[in-house]
Amino acid sequence: MATATTTDTTPSTRGRSGAARAHVQRFGTFLSGMIMPNIGAFIAWGLITAFFIEAGFTPFGPLGGFGQNAEGEPYTGLVGPMITYLLPLLIAYTGGRMVYDVRGGVVGAIATMGVIVGTDIPMFIGAMLMGPLTAWLMKKIDAIWDGKIKPGFEMLVNNFSAGIFAALMAIVGFFVVGPAVLAFSTAAAAAVDFLVTRGLLPLTSILIEPAKVLFLNNAINHGILTPLGTAQALEEGKSILFLLEANPGPGLGILLAYTFFGRGAARASAPGAALIHFVGGIHEIYFPYVLMKPALILAAIAGGMTGIFTLTVFDAGLRAPAAPGSIIAVLAQTASDSYVGVILAVTAATVVSFLVASVILKASRDKGEGDLTEATSRMEAMKGRKATVSSATVGTSGGADTGGTPARELADGGPVHHIVFACDAGMGSSAMGASVLRNKVKAAGFGDVKVTNAAIANLTDDFDIVVTHQDLATRARPKVPSAAVVTVDNFMGSPRYEEIVEAVQQRNGATVPAGAAPAQDTVPDGAAAGTASAPASATAGGAAAAAATGGPAADGDAASGGAILTRERIVMDGGARNAEQAIDEAGGLLVAAGAVTDAYVTSMHERESSVSTFMGNGLAIPHGTNQAKDSIRSSALSVVKYPEGLDWNGKPVTWVIGIAGKDNEHLAILSRVAKIFGNKEKVRQLDEASTADEVLELLGKVND
């Protein structure tokens, strides 16, 4: 009976705590979501302040806002207007748009003008209140007469309702919200001064460091400390608050301790994690190491307190937020009189954290050889989302697909006209997956069914079936409520592709025509990888056309600039031990060939941290982000074979193909690679190949 009672009550208790945590996560994410898209504006303001104010590196009154012109009028400058008007309005617009699209952003920005002119301090907190609140109320008001406006009067009603309501909210902001926020800001500033003058500010690490490791690092930094710190920086030229959470020292010390005194996978992965954490500024990468041995939170707290204490002793601070929390960003935003204090704060935090973590690891029977994968999964559960960078470093994966539309429900509904394969950028993996799926749908006799690819951000609710990676499903579903969403973790050979083909057969009320090839794993050599009607003689221009329409290029597209793959870019026995090293190995071949710059290899890691480039059938195709296209000099492939197999974040990989496509040529290249690795016989021949010449002969189609 006791056991039954425990079984009955525990899930309820966990459910309540999980729901509460989810609410906190969403609120924290919402707060930071208003700030983070505008970090570039904060950085711009910080740089202008650093250079052009009277105490800056290159004082200049017309920009810095000091001195007078020839007529005796004071210069306005950029510093004051940017922090007074631009930054709060950007925050308000972003918050309003998060709630009610562009209409919400506009009314939120208008309402925020009321709190801006009603006070004499930067109204970041006021903007974070007025923006989303006004947008939410506008959404509720619009719902009152939704569908009740006579045709031809929609624009009139929409514009006047937005203008009238936004004006009223601006007045409310001026008389009510502004004074309330001013009182709160004054109290918060007094609390900070109280802690600083009494030497108690380091105690905030007792709250900040555990909250970082759990799930609130961005919410604390960008949702709370950044608004307060920016107001302080306006008055004093710098703020210590920008470094309370962003100091990379505590995490670096823990990772260094694992590097010297850890064991197993934790020790092997810690050096790479330390580099990403300290230079890349991605702090979440050290969280699993703490969760694997919770006592290490003491090291993080000790390091954080030491760093804050050092900052207070030297009266050091930053001019603007350091985002991401990289040492490069920290030094770039350091006030001119604070370099010694900031550098010592980071160094001291690292040393103390390292010493405490080392003692804990050495004194424990478990030297840190615990299950890092399990720790990462626990962190993801607490954060309520996939921690892609940590997963990529420690070798976890999304696991089995359990969140897609069941096969039985997939077959329900009207005829299928349009299937879209969606990924983060709508370029690489989605193009490859769409190519494989398109061939299967066509082979089943449904050439009239469009199969394209797109970025998740560009999805609209006019698709019949949406296919996406399981890690991206939560982002895709809200955009396509009317579509069946199919999630996969194997781009090349997912069994869900067969379910989609069967669903098309049932929903379109047709059977496989006589003479048509049934859907199968083998992709016919002659099948077009692009549109169904693409001729084999299509040229490179088809790649650009495919990119414009959201689908892969036709198989006949040719890449410019000579051979895409050469014998020199084929390695038959790779030396990498994990996905990160494999990306460096494949990317290094592209760099050595002069096809890309080092920046492209960096973007390959960024792409992998977003979503895995594991394709299935023993293949991974790391490639850069869309933003790195300027780093590509010519289209090229590199091929690395791992005969003993490579653990690609939990997936077995034999072949790693690095890809760089100039002017969208990667779409055509991906189509050709998809065709080859979609053919089981060709994959078998590749696995049995023992020389680079044999591999080049089998993969030579990519040079067509």
Image (cartoon, helix red, strand yellow):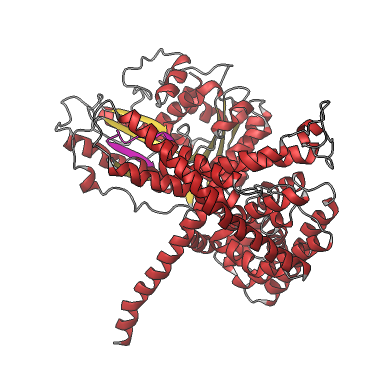
Residue 641 in percent (x, y) is at: 55, 39
Side (left or right) of 662 relative to 423:
right
**Which residues lie in the magenta part?**
455-470
Specify whether residue 463 is painted magenta. Answer: yes
Camera sees residue 486: yes
Name the one closer to the observer, 25 or 96. 96
Quadrant in the picture for residue 300: bottom right
Taking the spot 66% from the left edge, 48% from the top edge, the residue there is: 120
Q: Is residue 13 above or below residue 336?
A: below
Q: Which of the image's four quarters has the N terminus?
A: bottom left
Q: Is residue 332 above or below residue 186?
A: above
Q: Is residue 541 above or below residue 425?
A: above
Residue 201 in percent (x, y) is at: 72, 67
Q: Is residue 220 above or below residue 582?
A: below
Quadrant in the picture for residue 223: bottom right
Quadrant in the picture for residue 370: bottom right
Side (left or right) of 227 relative to 16:
right
Specify whether residue 142 is painted magenta. Answer: no
Name the one closer to the observer, 90 or 654. 90
